[in-house]
Image (cartoon, rainbow, N blue to C red):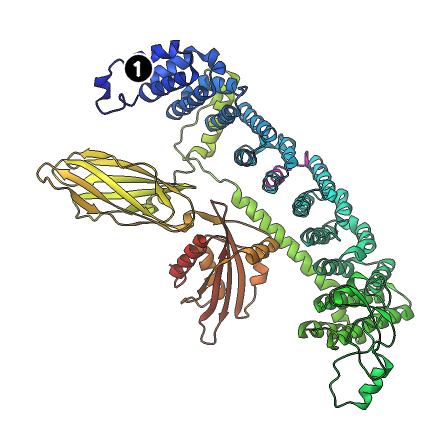
């Protein structure tokens, strides 16, 4: 084979294909048969095809290596002549029952690439699902899930029927496999299968309570987010899951508990029928919540959705119970007397008059007493009962933001009580109790008991509540009891609009040209065609009619990607069309001989800088006078770092014996080819921002004077998605802060925070901060922003 492939090989071994064909028919060794068939495939393709079609019935008995070469031959033949694929698809389907899993996987991939018939796609999807369950290697499972994800994009209707088979991959303990499985399933949900999917997810949530696996908390959070997504798309299933998930409000994994409270907050607004049952369950389980963020969310729900007299009363009682007895700390009579006699001295400690249970700053219990009549003990916090409530323990650690939320919730409940309670005595009693709690929180915040005093923002908010309860007007009551809810409803509607826009953006929009050929399926001859071939013809016609075959042929985009490599006065003119496809860069270089001489041993020599690697060695060509040559060069990419391709064209002429070198312009590979806009939740963005170690800080330096215009310019220049809601960017305040997010083809996350301020002279100042897990993407994005931010070019 090596001899035959030489430039003079056909003269050296004239009868090589005949010889190899005879060997192929008599040879028993599977490895030798594979090599012989590979030579026919490479050097005499017609003979290889003839041998394959002669032995169609025996293909399933051949060895694994030979079957792999057969599949490669089929792919090559069908790419060059699509009309021939009918006879080969039968061979592929027969190989789907092979014993080798590698052959089965290649069969499924080949089937998808050659045919779009529902029967073929269904067979391939079934094969992938079987491999997903039978293979123990996690890398294999991830690759198979990628293939299923591709099928979901192009053949969603068929994949919808396979959703329960895909869900079985959740049995794997690997979090990446589970995450990818859930992502695929969430895009395949329909009214027909939603109940089955939610039931499966509920069973998985219950399994996570066993605590056998280390990452059960992360998996539970993933499942809760998935159920949340299902309930938003199909509100009718919310009633079946909301009460189960509310059991996890006190989860030790704070992320899961936060997701649950966000889910409950959205469901109680979008499903009014569930309001009463959710409020009742929330009040019953509120004491189990241990995280401050979860407490804040639950308190907001209680303040907004406790509407009836009994609910309002239960809400106030629950908060009082979780705060415990007042005050939050006590001062003995001895100390008060000492304080009054020594007003000018600074007292740094508080004495406990007798032995009493106390809760320290770290949440543990202690008992202390005075050492003597004239000595002071260390400052300590006390509580009314041994069973301290969750709100009290959090407040005693100095969390006064939560204290402000408690004050707001109590204020809303008292204002609503005035509307539903006819007895003024009861309203006054509740108002007095609320005021006492707020004053006690202020006393605690200003006392020397805690290491840090109350912050000014929380202090102002609590004081505002006190003033409001002392003097309430109708306008203020309307703002507190109605406007807050309206703002939340507006936020939900904006979120839904963003999701709809994202779905529209994902939808493939393709158009057919007016003069495209359309074959009429019903007028075609069906003689000798199998059912699979008939289905394939229909699918091809549909693709032609909708323009799917021509959607990549955008001539305008192609012209934008042509780069001139040499000057117009050079003896050899060269230009390159650069195609970036995930991990590959293809350079299609056109070389034109502008001289009257024949150029011999013309070679395109390329070199790279950065994470780029040339795949093939350059070949020599002979170029006739004023003729051209198309030369392809393949380059592998391994990261998103900005790379540079440079090189020369070297050639000889008959007149000059020395080699002539023409230096080419450098080709800079743009990072924009590797990143695409993506979406993530605010919580996920903050988590990644805290974890990522590489940061690039770029100072704003631009002639643009409008904040929003500059933000739009940055988004356009970096090809990123703005995660900050449009409503948050409204108004003219002279400040703007926004988060941007994108994902690279290598799975890397790119985070950008834009913080800008308008100066008195009208110019913009501030910083653009870029964070990523790897150095390359942070540096490349920073260079791109620095280059592009000065103008709107």
- Residue closer to the observer: 262 or 95: 95
Q: Is residue 447 visible?
A: yes
Check the image and report above or below for 135 versus 368: above
Q: Is residue 727 left or right of residue 70?
A: right
Locate residue 552, reporting x and y percent. Answer: 41, 38
Location of residue 175 by image quarter? top right
Q: Quarter of the image containing the C terminus?
A: bottom left
Q: Which residue bears the numbered disc 1?
A: 17
- Name the residue at 26% across, 22% down: 3
Locate residue 460, reporting x and y percent. Answer: 70, 74
- Residue closer to the observer: 536 or 603: 603
Locate residue 118, reporting x and y percent. Answer: 55, 25
Q: Secondary structure at mark 1?
A: helix
- Name the residue at 39% across, 64% down: 790
Locate residue 234, reporting x and y percent. Answer: 69, 42
Q: Is residue 166 magenta?
A: no
- Residue closer to the observer: 663 or 379: 379
Q: Is residue 61 left or right of residue 267?
A: left
Q: Magenta part of the protein: which range?
A: 182-195
Q: Is residue 190 magenta?
A: yes
- Name the residue at 34% across, 16% down: 46
Density class for disc 1 (Cα within 10 Å; few <14, some 14-19, many ≥20) is many
- Name the residue at 49% across, 61% down: 769
Q: Quarter of the image containing the N terminus?
A: top left
């Amino acid at each position: 084979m090596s001899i035959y492939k030489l430039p003079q090989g056909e003269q050296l071994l004239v009868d090589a294909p005949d010889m190899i064909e005879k060997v192929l028919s008599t040879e028993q060794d599977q490895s030798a048969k594979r090599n012989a068939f590979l030579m026919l495939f490479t050097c005499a393709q017609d003979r290889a095809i003839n041998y394959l079609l002669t032995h169609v019935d025996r293909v399933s008995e051949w060895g694994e290596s030979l079957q792999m070469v057969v599949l490669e031959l089929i792919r090559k033949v069908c790419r060059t002549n699509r009309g021939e694929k009918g006879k080969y698809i039968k061979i592929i389907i027969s190989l789907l029952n092979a014993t080798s899993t590698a052959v089965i996987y290649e069969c499924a991939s080949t089937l998808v690439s050659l045919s779009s018939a529902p029967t073929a796609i269904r067979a391939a999807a079934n094969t992938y699902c079987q491999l997903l369950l039978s293979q123990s290697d996690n890398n294999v499972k991830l690759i198979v899930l990628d293939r299923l994800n591709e099928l979901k994009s192009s053949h969603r209707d068929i994949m919808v029927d396979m959703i329960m088979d895909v869900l079985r991959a959740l049995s794997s303990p690997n979090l990446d496999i589970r995450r990818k499985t859930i992502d695929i399933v969430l895009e395949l949900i329909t009214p027909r299968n939603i109940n089955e999917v939610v039931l499966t997810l509920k069973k998985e949530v219950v399994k996570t309570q066993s605590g056998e696996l280390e990452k059960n908390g992360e998996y539970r959070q993933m499942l809760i987010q998935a159920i949340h997504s299902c309930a938003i798309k199909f509100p009718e299933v919310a009633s079946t899951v909301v009460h189960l998930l509310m059991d996890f409000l006190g989860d030790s994994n704070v992320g899961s508990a936060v997701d649950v409270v966000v889910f409950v907050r959205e469901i109680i607004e979008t499903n009014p029928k569930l309001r009463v049952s959710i409020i009742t369950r929330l009040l019953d389980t509120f004491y189990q919540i241990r995280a401050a963020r979860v407490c804040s969310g639950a308190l907001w729900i209680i303040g907004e959705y406790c509407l009836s007299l009994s609910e309002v009363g239960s809400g106030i009682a629950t908060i009082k119970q979780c705060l415990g007895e007042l005050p939050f700390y006590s001062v003995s009579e001895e100390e008060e007397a000492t304080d009054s006699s020594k007003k000018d001295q600074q007292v740094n400690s508080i004495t406990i008059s007798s032995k009493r249970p106390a809760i320290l700053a770290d949440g543990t219990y202690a008992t202390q007493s005075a050492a003597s009549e004239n000595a002071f003990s260390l400052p300590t916090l006390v509580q009314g009962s041994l069973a301290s409530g969750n709100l009290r323990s959090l407040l005693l650690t100095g969390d006064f933001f939560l204290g402000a939320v408690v004050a707001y919730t109590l204020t809303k409940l008292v204002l609503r009580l005035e509307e539903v309670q006819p007895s003024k005595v009861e309203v006054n009693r509740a108002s007095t109790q609320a005021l006492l709690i707020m004053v006690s929180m202020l006393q605690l915040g200003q006392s020397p008991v805690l290491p840090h005093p109350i912050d000014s923002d929380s202090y102002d908010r609590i004081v505002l509540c006190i003033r409001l309860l002392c003097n309430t007007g109708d306008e203020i009551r309307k703002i507190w009891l109605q406007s807050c809810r309206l703002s939340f409803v507006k936020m939900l509607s904006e979120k839904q609009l963003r999701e709809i826009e994202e779905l529209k953006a994902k939808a493939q929009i393709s158009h057919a040209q007016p003069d495209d050929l359309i074959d009429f399926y019903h007028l075609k001859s069906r003689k000798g065609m199998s059912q699979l071939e008939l289905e394939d013809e229909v699918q091809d016609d549909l693709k032609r009619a909708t323009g799917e075959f021509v959607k990549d042929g955008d001539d305008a985009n192609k012209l934008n990607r042509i780069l001139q490599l040499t000057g117009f006065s050079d003896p050899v003119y060269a230009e390159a069309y650069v195609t970036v496809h995930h991990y590959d860069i293809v350079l299609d270089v056109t070389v034109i001989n502008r001289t009257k001489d024949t150029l011999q041993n013309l070679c395109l020599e390329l070199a790279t800088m950065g994470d780029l690697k040339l795949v093939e060695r350059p070949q020599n060509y002979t170029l006739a006078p004023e003729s051209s040559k198309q030369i392809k060069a393949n380059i592998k990419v391994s990261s998103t770092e900005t790379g540079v391709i440079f090189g020369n064209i070297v050639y000889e002429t008959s007149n000059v014996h020395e080699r002539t070198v023409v230096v080419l312009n450098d080709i800079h590979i743009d990072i924009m080819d590797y990143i695409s806009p993506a979406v993530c939740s605010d919580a996920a963005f903050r988590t990644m921002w805290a974890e990522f170690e590489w940061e690039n800080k770029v100072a704003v330096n631009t002639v643009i004077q409008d904040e929003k215009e500059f933000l739009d310019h940055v988004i356009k220049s970096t090809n990123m998605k703005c995660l900050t809601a449009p409503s948050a960017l409204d108004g003219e305040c002279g400040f703007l802060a926004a988060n941007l997010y994108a994902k690279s083809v290598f799975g890397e996350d790119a985070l950008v925070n834009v913080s800008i301020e308008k100066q008195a002279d009208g110019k913009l100042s501030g910083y653009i901060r870029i964070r990523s897990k790897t150095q390359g993407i942070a540096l490349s994005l920073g260079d791109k922003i620095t280059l592009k931010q000065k103008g709107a070019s």
